[in-house]
Amino acid sequence: MQHSPGILFDPLGRLRSGWRAAIFLFAFIFAAIVLGVIGQLVLRALGVDAAPNSAAFMLTNGITSLIPALLLGWLCGWLFENLPFRAIGAAFTSGWLNHLFLGVIIGAATLSLAVLIAFLYGGLKFNFDVAAGDKGIAWSLAVSFVVFAGASAFEEALFRGYILQTFSRSGLAWLAILLTSIFFGAVHLGNPGVTVFSTLNTILAGLWFSVAYLKTRDLWFVWGMHLMWNWMQGSFFGIEVSGLTYITTSPLLKEIDSGPTWLTGSTYGIEGGIVCTVALIVSTLAIWLLPIAKPDLELLAMTSKSEPPASDISEPSAVAGG
């Protein structure tokens, strides 16, 4: 049966991707608020510090946002597009562990490249955090790893999850990448020390993560990148992570920032400097151009543009004398 394109439905008779994404987003915001409030009440009942600038708050917020991002992404995919949970990219498919490991390596290498450039130009120097002691550093590294793992998993499930994927199935992947990357930059506008340059770099990071997602079509690869970028930045090098310093109390190294701001990012951290821009561009090109990862064929099919049935495609007109 042929379907006429309209405002609500596409030629396949499905709700259009824009409406699907909007329904998911509104449902996610509602569910995340409800679960977030419940999470904070549980922390207070347990006597845990639930202040907005605490690691416990950030971890709880990450978990209570990750759950609806994944479950509602699956539910919308099932209701609107007849897709299974594994389409969201968080299932244990055949290559999930390899993609996670590769993401960890690339995330660490990209962050290290940015730090190396700043170090070579004299903007950053580092000392060992001797005062914290071995046990203090080990505890801080472990706690911050868990916090960054939860926060980065939530952000990837939201920004590279159902919204990006459902637009991709409508042939609008690059529009979705642009929109979600701008949104990714916008949600960091309230962070300490934010600047126009740091926001542009955060948008660029959104493009970096999106290209990584398109490379594997799962969330494991991009989660590994995001996790290691944040964890190494804050917990290994002692640099502010998007302006935040409270997550890692005793980093392995202490940062000595000599500036200038355009190079190192100053109080926002390296994400506010030109070295971040260079590292992200180099890494994005490498991910896109080099044969470093392959998507699961089933996931590739479930996240690529859906074509209308053959009966819905008009036959080309015959050409006289052809």
Image (cartoon, helix red, strand yellow):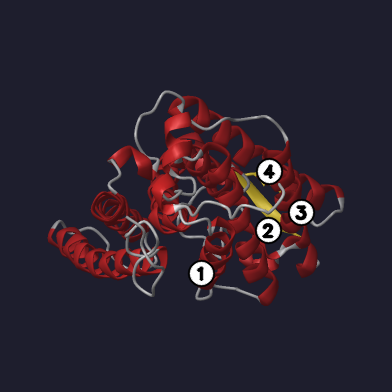
Q: Given the current orientation, which residue lies at the most extreme front position? A: 321
Circles 3, 1 touching at the beta carbon (< 8 Å): no
Badge 2 or badge 3: first in the primary sequence: 3
Q: Is residue 269 visible?
A: no
Circle 2 residue = 270
Identify residue type, mark 1: Phe
Circle 1 residue = 183
Identify residue type, mark 3: Leu
Residue at image x 52%, y 62%? 176
Q: Secondary structure at mark 3?
A: strand
Identify the disc placed on residue 110: 4
Q: Is residue 223 visible?
A: yes
Circle 3 residue = 124
Badge 2 or badge 4: first in the primary sequence: 4
How many numbered badges does the structure rendering display? 4
Disc 3/disc 4 C-alpha distance (Å): 16 Å
Disc 2/disc 3 C-alpha distance (Å): 10 Å
Q: Secondary structure at mark 1?
A: helix
Disc 4/disc 1 C-alpha distance (Å): 22 Å
Circle 1 or circle 2, nearest the eye: 1
Circles 2, 3 touching at the beta carbon (< 8 Å): yes
Identify residue type, mark 4: Thr
Q: Is residue 11 left or right of residue 211?
A: left
Disc 2/disc 4 C-alpha distance (Å): 12 Å
Residue 312 percent location from the top left of the image: 41, 53
Q: Is residue 21 left or right of residue 238?
A: left
Identify residue type, mark 2: Ile
Q: Given the current orientation, which residue lies at the most extreme right position? A: 121
Disc 3/disc 1 C-alpha distance (Å): 30 Å
